Amino acid sequence: MKLCFRWYGEQDPVALQHIRQVPGVQGVVGALFDIPVGQVWPQEPIASMRRRIEDAGLKLMGIESVPVHEDIKLGRPTREVYLDNFCRTIQNLGSQGISVVCYNFMPIFDWLRTDLATPLPDGSTCLSYDHADVIKIDPLSLGKINLPAWVGDFSQARLKELFAAYALVDEARIWDNLAYFLEQVVPVAEQSGVKLGIHPDDPPWPIFGLPRIIGNEKSLQRVIDLVDSPANGLSLCSGSLGADPANDIPSMVRRFGLQGRIHFAHLRNVRVTGERRFYETAHPSSEGGLDMYEIIKAYHQVGFNGIMRPDHGRAIWGEKGIVGYGLYDRSLGAAYLMGLWEAVSRG
Ligand code: DNO
């Protein structure tokens, strides 16, 4: 595996020079954050992001994420232009030597948490989620939360319009729209040397009545089966999937890893505290509900040689940064993952 870090570009308080000092981390995944959703990412800014990262002694190992325009997810006739733009973006990324692109198919909102600073007994804070609180939230006011990765227009007017449109889109329609998307995009990705990795829905169940369809082993297999190409794969996120205790992550790693369809591994731990209720913990198995040793062992067993990154960390040592994406706890996570990997490799 190749270990990397997520970097939020020039606005990220975490400097590339500091990422470079995390043992074992060879590169970063990044994105262009100032291009409106649905527009083509031109070659030049991609190239300059790549050069900037290389100048810091790191590699640009993938993109997280190219956002999918809502018209594609909704299956509106206007999706054609956005599909075409998405394909051109993939071609431009391929020309710049980028081989992994993460995306998701969550309606309107990307990942969601209900508390961004839940205190832990050790004095750190973490991100947490309680579905009982979600039920009380007016989604039209969610623009204020502004989690990293939430890109686009979250004004009340836009949200109202989108909720009205999604009221007519059930799970079956979203699946059709995902299939249509992949049928257009996967052949282009294949020709461009790019591997696509869909990120599971986070949390892996519907919120605010919006259809979320990618939350378990069956649905991940269904995505793979929609278009049979090595370019059509997964960003397997242990934390997103791990919020549902019914998900067996090591078994998923073995199943999809053996098919060669895990293109990006996200590793983090969670502690489930009730029905649709969880908080994010430090990475080690001792801290949360996931057996990270078994997960890493499964990656090793299937000969995983793709990119892997420590996902969300707690806020520790007084660090103020992008929620979930500080330097310190993710670095501890990286060191831990390196340790596990070395141990299973020598096993
Ligand atoms: C959250 C991330 C997600 C992820 C996107 C992928 O921290 O895991 O925002 O990057 O869903 O498209």
Image (cartoon, grey):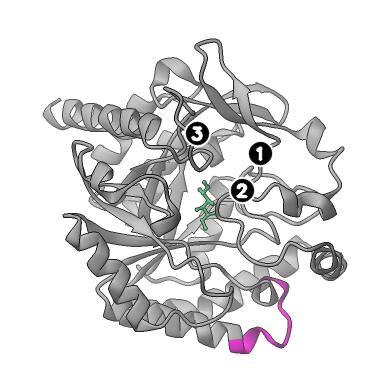
Considering only vertical position in the picture, is 8 above or below 255?
Answer: below
Give the CA separation, mark 2 to mark 1: 9 Å
Residue marked by disc 2: 147
Image position, residue 220 (x, y; %): 53, 54
Image position, residue 153 (x, y; %): 70, 67
Tags 3 and 2 in contact by the CB under 8 Å rule?
A: no
Tags 2 and 1 in contact by the CB under 8 Å rule?
A: yes
Task: Look at the numbered disc 2 and say if its residue's Cβ is closer than 8 Å to ligand 1.
Answer: yes
Q: Is residue 80 magenta?
A: yes
Image position, residue 333 (x, y; %): 34, 30
Residue type (three-letter) at the residue carrying disc 3: Asp
The span picked out in magenta is: 73-81
Residue marked by disc 3: 248
Q: Residue at x 73, y 62 (%)?
A: 154
Considering only vertical position in the picture, is 334 above or below 176?
Answer: above
Can residue 1 be seen by looking at this rendering? no
Q: Nearer the viewer, residue 282 or 184?
A: 282
Label 1 packing within 10 angstroms: few (<14), some (14-19), many (20+): some
Q: Could you tell me which secondary element the residue under label 3 belongs to?
A: loop
Image position, residue 275 (x, y; %): 73, 26
Q: Could you tell me which secondary element the residue under label 1 belongs to?
A: loop
Label 2 packing within 10 angstroms: few (<14), some (14-19), many (20+): some
Q: Residue at x 37, y 47 (%)?
A: 265
Quarter of the image that includes the C terminus: top left
- Front label number (2 vs 1): 2
Residue 113 image label? 1
Q: Residue at x 87, y 37 (%)?
A: 136
Considering only vertical position in the picture, is 116 above or below 60?
Answer: above
Residue type (three-letter) at the residue carrying disc 2: Leu
Residue type (three-letter) at the residue carrying disc 1: Arg
Relative side of 4 to 141, left or right: left
